[in-house]
Amino acid sequence: MTVDMSGARWFKSTHSQPTQDCVEIAHLSAGAVGVRDSKNPAGPALVFSADQWDSFLASEIWQR
């Protein structure tokens, strides 16, 4: 999946401390979600479809 992320608005979880390194997400076009490493914002990002992201959020790993 190719998605233009040039205008993406990235954010961290509200549970993250401002000085901690963690993942950031961005809501992209067509319901896609981008995921990147906060300590390397110019680095690569993963892109998930809306269905893939919903499956991740519903998974047992996320519920722990």
Image: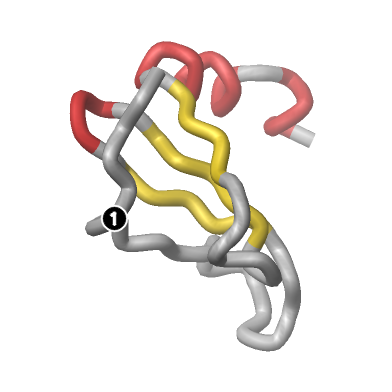
Label 1 residue SS: loop
Residue 60, picture quadrant: top right
Q: Is residue 13 left or right of residue 22?
A: left
Q: Is residue 54 left or right of residue 6?
A: right
Q: Residue reaching furthest bottom?
A: 19
Q: Quadrant of the N terminus?
A: top left
Q: Is residue 22 above or below residue 20?
A: above
In front: 44, or 52?
Answer: 44
Report the amino acid beneath label 1: Ser
- In the rendered image, residue 48, in percent from the top left (x then y), is placed at 47, 25
In front: 26, or 1?
Answer: 1
Q: Is residue 36 left or right of residue 11?
A: right
How many marks do you count on the picture?
1
Q: Which residue is mark 1?
A: 6
- In the rendered image, residue 6, in percent from the top left (x then y), is placed at 29, 55
Residue at horizontal 74 percent and vertical 71 percent from the top: 21
Residue at horizontal 45 percent and vertical 41 percent from the top: 34
Residue 30, picture quadrant: top left
Q: Is residue 17 above or below residue 45?
A: below
Q: Quadrant of the C terminus?
A: top right
Q: Is residue 9 above or below residue 25?
A: below
Residue at horizontal 40 percent and vertical 12 percent from the top: 51
